[in-house]
């Protein structure tokens, strides 16, 4: 089995996955509640919390799988991109575990990890395919040609799609993280109530900052009781605009390259409207959309693992 470890943002996660891609355990301890009162992730707070949680989370992943470290043949860990202090907790833990058991260590890129959420049992996808990766930190259109071979076709020029959800939720007075809150509230609203603009930028890139400003203008002049009454309509219209922007780009890219298979991964892939708008796409399973370690262990299968002592010098990276 492969032990996966993920600590790039505010989820402390460990998982055990077989070399064939079956998930034996997948433990995610979210720190969202801890950061909610700040309206976003506080890096230093996240690092300290990872430090407290990583030991128990790894132990729980082993226990859930009915395994011990004797059953682990490789350790896979997120090396970046993400919060440096947070990443270093996972990386140091992975190095220590690998060293203590004489195991090789596979450094995993977090974004490849999200894509690798598609390679797990019971319904694994095989490259090539066109992939939309939409998370809190990234919005990418990827031409995935092989397990370790992808090309960036488009990216966001400003905010990531998940960031747009989170910032929109804050303007609407909803909790953090905001994507799920907007998703839930939008179901009760009228998506046609507000006509929010979908930015058109050249090529296959995305832009969400104008949309956020449009929501700001729509909300700031409303008296508090009015905002309460219009909140669901605002959420539904705002979500509609984000989903439309994503889906349009996916369609354009798919047509442009003649891609027959489209996949969607990352936290925003959990969005119910986005999922409904792309019925033929391969969608990451719901529990594997937001950050988790099963996807990291999955990606670790396709990475050249480093033997002792060469992995000791590995450093985390904040951006790609
Ligand atoms: O992949 P992820 O867990 O972390 C990053 O790598 O960034 O993505 C988190 C993002 C957050 O911005 C969150 O608001 C968004 O995914 N998200 C959603 C939903 N669930 C999570 N956005 C829209 N609808 C959802 N249901
Ligand atoms: Zn992520």
Image (spheres, grey):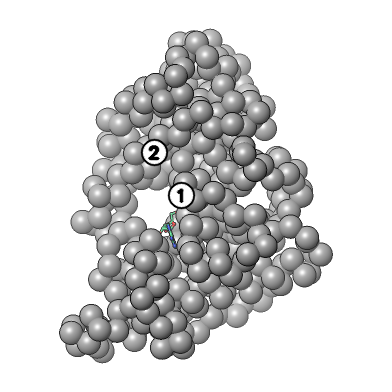
Q: Is mark 1 within 8 Å of ligand 1?
A: yes
Compared to residue 186, the image places residue 72 above or below, namely: above
Q: Position of residue 37 (x, y in %)?
A: 21, 56
Tell me the quadrant of the picture where the N terminus can be found: top right
Q: Residues within 10 Å of mark 2 (few under 14, many from 20)?
A: many
Check disc 1 and report the residue beneath it. Answer: 290
The quarter of the displayed image where residue 55 is located: top left
**What residue sits 66% from the left and 67% below the top?**
250
**Disc sitting over residue 8 in the figure:** none
Q: Seen in the image, is 226 located left or right of residue 297?
A: left
Residue 40 in view in this figure:
yes
Residue identified by numbered label 2:
28
Instruction: Relative to 222, say whether 31 is above or below.
Output: above
Q: Earlier in the sequence, mark 2 or mark 1?
A: 2
Number of numbered discs on residues: 2
Residue 128: x percent and y percent?
Answer: 76, 49
Contact? badges 2 and 1 (CB < 8 Å): yes
Q: Is residue 206 visible?
A: no
């Amino acid at each position: 089995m492969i032990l996966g470890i993920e600590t790039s943002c505010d989820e402390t996660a460990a998982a055990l996955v077989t070399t064939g891609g079956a998930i034996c355990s997948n433990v995610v301890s979210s720190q969202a509640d801890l950061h909610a009162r700040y309206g976003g992730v506080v890096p230093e707070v996240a690092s300290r919390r990872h430090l407290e949680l990583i030991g128990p989370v790894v132990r729980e992943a082993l226990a859930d799988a009915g395994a011990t470290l004797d059953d682990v043949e490789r350790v896979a860990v997120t090396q970046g991109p993400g919060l440096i202090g947070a990443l270093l907790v996972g990386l140091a833990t992975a190095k220590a575990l690998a060293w203590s058991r004489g195991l090789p260590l596979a450094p995993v890129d977090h974004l490849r990890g999200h894509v690798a959420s598609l390679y797990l049992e019971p319904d694994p996808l095989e490259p090539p395919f066109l992939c939309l990766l939409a998370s809190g930190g990234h919005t990418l259109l990827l031409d995935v040609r092989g397990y370790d071979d992808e090309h960036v076709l488009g990216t966001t020029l400003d905010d990531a799609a998940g960031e747009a959800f989170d910032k929109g939720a804050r303007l609407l007075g909803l909790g953090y993280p905001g994507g799920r809150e907007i998703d839930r509230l939008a179901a009760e609203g009228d998506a046609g109530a507000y006509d929010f603009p979908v930015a058109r930028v050249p090529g296959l890139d995305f832009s969400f900052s104008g949309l956020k400003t449009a929501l700001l203008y729509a909300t700031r002049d409303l008296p508090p009781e009015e905002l309460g009454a219009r909140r669901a309509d605002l959420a539904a219209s705002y979500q509609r605009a984000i989903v439309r922007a994503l889906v349009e780009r996916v369609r354009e890219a798919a047509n442009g390259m003649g891609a027959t298979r489209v996949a969607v991964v990352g936290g925003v892939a959990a969005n119910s409207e986005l999922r409904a708008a792309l019925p033929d796409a391969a969608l990451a399973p719901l529990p594997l959309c937001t950050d988790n370690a099963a996807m990291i262990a999955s990606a670790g299968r396709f990475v050249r693992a480093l033997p002792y002592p060469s992995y000791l010098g590995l450093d985390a990276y904040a951006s790609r």
